[in-house]
Image (cartoon, grey):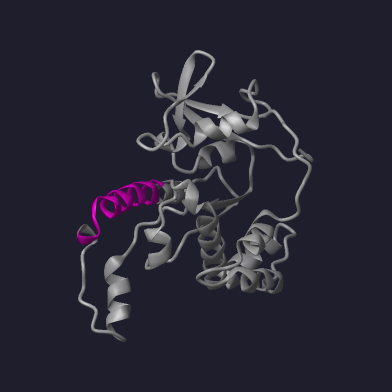
Amino acid sequence: MGGKKLYITAMTLDGAEEVVFGPDERNDITISKAVQASTAMPGFYKPVKIGNEYFVDGGVKQTANLDLMIQKNAKLIICYNPFRPYENREFVEKMSRHTKTKQQSLTEEGFFSVLNQFFRTIFHTRIHAALNLYEKSSTFDGDIILIEPEADDQAFFSMNPFALGHRLHAAQLGFESVRNSINKKFDKIAPILASYGITMNRKGVEVEYQKIHGEEPDPFMLKKVLEGEKRKKQRKRV
């Protein structure tokens, strides 16, 4: 894998134990099978059987696995958390300045919105608890960059991340979310990355952004931008 190491986590259903798949960890399965196990969110996807054990989403045990990255001697950690809780009041207040929109609660949007907010809050809280821990740690001397959607990003919140039919739209929103988050913190992130020999440049991202921005972007162009150059399919093992 070009000198890079990939680690994927999952949790055993019957023992609630964290399992790490990777080159110097458990490596007897394919990457695709490890990803399948790691994303088997209870209630949405059934547990994945590997050997004689069943596995579920590693996020049940830990949200971001920052400890694993630090154990593997990572000094620069970039953490993307798409599950930030939605601040409905902030969005409604912004809208009410321009319209006569009556403030509404997320409860009026139905069960999915309530459940969505519930899971987002849990994941968001756990990540920030871990970040606070390592910020005060005397043993970790690296940098952690957290990228999240804006708190009032209604389009991102309304999207169902588990709906396969919405995968292109989800990818588009993810691209735009990361772009917006980095733009907002560009002056803080750029010097950190520069200290690791990484130069940031807005130009290339903006060119790609203009190609896919809009309510109904061309699906072919969207896939081309998000997937990059097509590579020969190769089945690899972790």
When asked about the image quadrant of residue 189, the answer is bottom right
Relative to 61, is 20 on the left or the right?
Answer: right
Taking the view exactly as shown, the residue that stands out farthest to the bottom is 98
When asked about the image quadrant of residue 98, the answer is: bottom left
- The relative height of residue 232 versus residue 30 in the rendered view (above or below) is below
- Observer-nearest residue: 70 or 17? 17
Residue 6's place in the image compared with 185, above or below, is above
Camera-nearest residue between 174 and 112: 112
* Image quarter of the N terminus: top right
| Residue 24 rendering spot, x and y as whole percentages | 67, 26
Is 111 covered by the magenta stretch? Answer: yes
Horizontal arrangement in the rendering, residue 177 relative to residue 103 (left or right): right
Can residue 119 be found in the magenta stretch? yes
Height in image: 188 above or below 66?
A: below
What x and y, as percent, mark residue 90? 31, 72
Residue 189 seen in the figure: yes
What span is in magenta?
Answer: 108-126
Across and down, in percent, residue 168 comes to 55, 56
The residue sitting at 38% across, 46% down in the picture is 126
* Quadrant (top left, top right, bottom left, bottom right) of the C terminus: top right
Give whichever of 141, 173 is nearer the camera.
173
Instruction: Decide: is 43 above or below 18.
Output: below
Examine the residues drawn in magenta and state their main secondary structure. helix
Could one spot residue 134 in this view of the protein? no
Q: Is residue 157 left or right of residue 166?
A: left
